[in-house]
Image: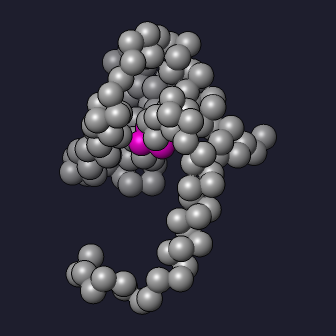
């Protein structure tokens, strides 16, 4: 059941290709903008007072806290954060980025950084 990050990259990109999202190539700037849009959707759900840790589900204008079947669309902050990663995975799949290696490398580097490196407030 567990999938590696690079398996998720491959699956997300394959699904996007199968659904026609790559019939025309997309610029890297467009891919980044789409990642941003998913974060903005998460922010809007938060601003609307939606719970951070729970999805709700929609189908044909009906909303419920239970996903009655897999064709009920997940909505909410967790779902939008998942969309961010799905967009990242798709972009990495398109450009052959080894995201698993990049994450491992960056986390190892971050572990070497001093307390609150850079001295910024947030
Ligand atoms: Mg979304």
Q: Can you see residue 38?
A: no
| Image x and y of residue 117, in percent | 36, 84
Residue 9 vs 78, above or below: the answer is above
Q: Quadrant of residue 111?
A: bottom right
Residue 48 vs 66, above or below: the answer is below
The answer to if 99 sits in the magenta stretch is no
**Range of magenta residues:** 82-86
Residue 99 vs 118, above or below: the answer is above
| Image x and y of residue 113, in percent | 47, 83
What sort of colour scheme is used for the picture? one colour
Q: Residue furthest right?
A: 1
Q: Quadrant of residue 63?
A: top left
At 28% from the left and 35% from the top, the residue drawn is: 29
Number of callouts: 0
At 53% from the left and 83% from the top, the residue drawn is: 112
* Residue in the foreground of this view, choosing between 60 and 14: 14
At 43% from the left and 10% from the top, the residue drawn is: 23
Is residue 88 shown left or right of residue 119? right
* Residue in the foreground of this view, choosing between 87 and 98: 98
Secondary structure predominantly adopted by residues drawn in magenta? helix
Query: Which quadrant would the C terminus be assigned to in this image?
Result: bottom left
């Amino acid at each position: 059941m567990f999938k590696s990050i690079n398996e998720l990259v491959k699956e997300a990109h394959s699904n996007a290709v199968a659904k026609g999202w790559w019939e025309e190539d997309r610029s890297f700037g467009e891919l980044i903008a789409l990642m941003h849009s998913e974060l903005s959707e998460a922010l809007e759900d938060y601003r609307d007072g939606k719970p951070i840790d729970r999805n709700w589900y929609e189908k044909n204008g009906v909303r419920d806290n239970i996903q009655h079947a897999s064709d009920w669309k997940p909505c909410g902050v967790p779902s939008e954060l998942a969309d961010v990663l799905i967009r990242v995975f798709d972009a990495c799949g398109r450009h052959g980025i080894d995201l698993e290696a990049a994450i491992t490398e960056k986390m190892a580097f971050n572990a070497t950084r001093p307390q609150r490196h850079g001295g910024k407030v947030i």
